[in-house]
Image: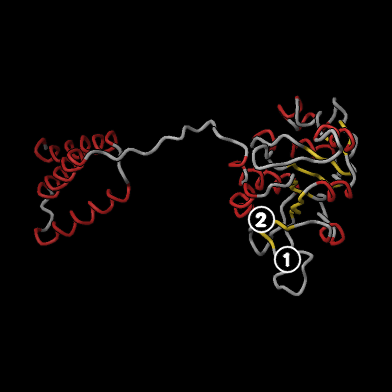
Amino acid sequence: MSDASDRTRRDDPNGRNSSSAGDRTPPAVAVVDAETPGNVGTIARAMKNFGFEELLLVDPPELDPDGEAYGYAGHAREDVLPNATELSFGELAENYHTIGCTAVTNEDDRSHVRYPYSTPADLAERLPTVEAPTALVFGRERVGLTNEELARIDEICSIPASEEYPVLNLGQAATVTLYELRTLTVSETQLPNLERTRAPEPALDRLYGQWGALLEELNHPDEKRDKTMRMLRRVFGRADLTEREANTLLGVLRRATERPAED
């Protein structure tokens, strides 16, 4: 684990953090005074899941390579966790545009310790325009970030949750936030990004024709058939059936239409 001076020297030979629109890096993730090594490992794993690399630790517990943190980190034990930087809260606030994550907010403009705030989804839209080195800051498991710490932070982020119980544990809060911000770091996921292809109109027309045949075979009342067919068209229109789905339904309807004659 490196310290803050090592990180500063890596960023700029003159001891300054450098950033420009052309070389923006994803936000760092800072964890303040984590209570257990497992919390750090869980957050490191979430970072690895969603493409975040820079882990900053303020007053961390001891992270034994054979202990809980590395056990919880999954593949993040190979890079995110061992490359974490230890620094003070003052160094964090001085060198980064900080975003403090908290469940408890004030809801009027008379106090600016926890107000105004953004949601993680809001940040996903706005952070690409922030040119300063940025850090998402998470606090302690039980009490989060103190008001004194939040007063030194540039902006506040809060996850929308049930009013009855809005408090997430540290690992949950980090995972939800990083998931919402994955568009800043991940260009491809394990899920194929395929556009849905709507069935061609002739296939849909055959499907609707078969529905009409079934309604006739079932002696559906004549005065209700037009209305029923209109309803079916709108249901399937909203569904955007693929050609395979349309053909499968067509086959089922044909068997249903033919069944009364077999009996």
The type of residue carrying mark 2 is Ile
From the image, tell me which residue sits under label 2. Answer: 159
Q: Residues within 10 Å of mark 2 (few under 14, many from 20)?
A: many
What is the number of the mark on residue 96? none
What is the residue that sits farthest to the front in this orientation? 14
Decide if residue 149 is on the left or right side of residue 80: right
Could you tell me residue 188's position as x and y percent?
Answer: 54, 32
Looking at the picture, does residue 83 appear above or below residue 158?
above
Q: Residues within 10 Å of mark 1 (few under 14, many from 20)?
A: some
Could you tell me residue 196's position as x and y percent?
Answer: 36, 39
Residue depicted at x 81% and y 35%: 12
Quadrant placement of the N terminus? top right
- Of label 2 and label 1, which has the lower sequence position? 1
The type of residue carrying mark 1 is Tyr
Scheme of colours in the image: secondary structure
Q: Secondary structure at mark 1?
A: loop
* Nearer to us: label 2 or label 1: 1
Residue depicted at x 73% and y 29%: 76
Residue depicted at x 73% and y 58%: 156
From the image, tell me which residue sits under label 1. Answer: 115
Rendered image quadrant of residue 72: top right
Q: Nearer the viewer, residue 140 or 157?
A: 157
Residue depicted at x 75% and y 27%: 79
Quadrant placement of the C terminus? top left
Looking at the picture, does residue 44 appear above or below residue 107?
above
What is the residue that sits farthest to the bottom in this orientation? 110
Could you tell me residue 261's position as x and y percent?
Answer: 9, 38
Q: Nearer the viewer, residue 13 or 260?
A: 13
Q: Secondary structure at mark 2?
A: loop
Rendered image quadrant of residue 252: top left
Decide if residue 197 is on the left or right side of residue 204: right
Could you tell me residue 239's position as x and y percent?
Answer: 32, 47
